[in-house]
Amino acid sequence: MKILSDRINSLPVSATLAMAAKARELKEKGIDIISLSLGEPDFNTPEFIKKSAIEAINDNYNSYSPVDGYVEVKKSIRKKFQRDNNLNYNLDQIVISTGAKQSIANVCMVLLNPGDEVILPAPYWVSYSAIATLSEAKSVVVSSSIESDFKITPKQLEESITSKTKLIIFNSPNNPSGAIYSELEYRELAKVLAKYPNIYIISDEIYEHINYGNSIFSFASIKEMYDRTITVNGLAKAFAMTGWRIGYIGAPNWIAKACNKMQGQITSGANCIAQRATIAALDAPVSKIQYMVDEFDKRRELISNLLKNIDGFKLKKPLGAFYVFPDISFFFGKEISGIKIKNSSDFSLFLLETANVATVSGDAFGNPNCIRISYAASQSQIKEACNQIKASLNNKF
């Protein structure tokens, strides 16, 4: 008799977290690993946000918060949506959660039934498919490549839709590729979805502020899509607040109400101190976090130039987020230093064991020809990592 449930047994381990754990394990053995696997800013949370949290502690915020979040925080989120995204949500359309991952999980759990299909334009964040599995739905992966700028076409979208399609998840700027859908591209995809009124859209915009001179267009700002789109965002990436665990949605009120009900039986309200700090973060002008984006941009240029000089790496410079997603299929079928490389998982493991650099296989993101490399690391670490990768590959295949 199996003790653990089929639900947990069918769930894959998060590839990003697994690689991070393996890197930590090697570090504990005294091996100097440069970890470029996790999507976590290496900056400290800005002082003005920390000050707000300290004030909340001193003001004795220590009780359970409302399940869907404090009204004052929801007002700040509403203003942020208006200011940055040209979106208007009432307070009853906003739900605050313990990270954007929970926001996405809430939506999937309240919308999906067993056998429903979720369209995932690849590459996609690793947890999308796992959350779909938890919701007893089927993931339908729509492939893209470096040649298509890691974006899908309206034709591909239409061909992937069936009578069982219930949800599609867009992510722009994209993790892992850094691709950004333009307003025109989103409007063309929306024309396809307009034919299928029973399909809902999650627009994951967690990286919106980490972009390099590109305007970010919110899918819900397409008038015909507003009532079918759930806009997801959070504070982890742009504000260097990964451990604070604050995410939120703007959605049709009936979906928001359902998410509130779901969350009430799982985690209840998000952390009270982190919520109070959210007000300071979102009320501040975006210019207050520009220094982080500027530094990421320098690192983007650096890592792009360094990787281009490594034979076998095919690269598209990212437009947003803080990852590069090179195509490394050149190495498939080759033997390097006595190690046969069959796929991107083999290649990532090879880099970890021979170059002491932690990356993540593209398989986990729905694109098996690539690996994800985070540049949320210092410039000196990036230089050293690229030099070690190049040395491990140089004249060895």
Image (tube, rainbow, N blue to C red):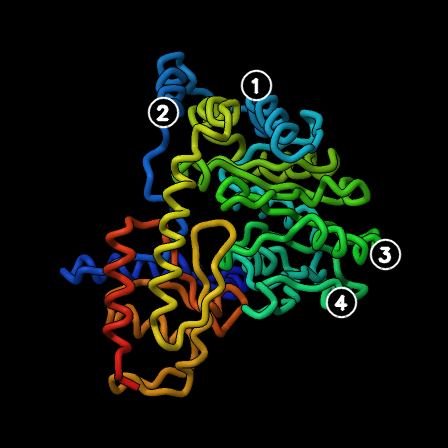
Q: Is residue 300 left or right of residue 382?
A: right
**Closer to the eye: label 4 or 1:** 4
The answer for how far apart the CA atoms under marks 2 and 3 are is 47 Å
Tell me the kind of residue under disc 3: Lys
Q: Identify the residue position indicated by label 2 in the image.
A: 50
Tell me the kind of residue under disc 2: Lys
Residue 46 placement: quadrant: top left
Q: Identify the residue position indicated by label 1 in the image.
A: 72
Q: Identify the residue position indicated by label 4 in the image.
A: 155
Residue 335 x, y percent position in the rendering: 32, 87
**52 or 147, which lies in front?**
147
Where 364 falls versus 329 (above or below)?
above
**Total marks in image:** 4
The answer for how far apart the CA atoms under marks 3 and 1 are is 38 Å
Tag 2–tag 1 contact (CB < 8 Å): no
Q: Secondary structure at mark 3?
A: loop
Q: Secondary structure at mark 4?
A: helix
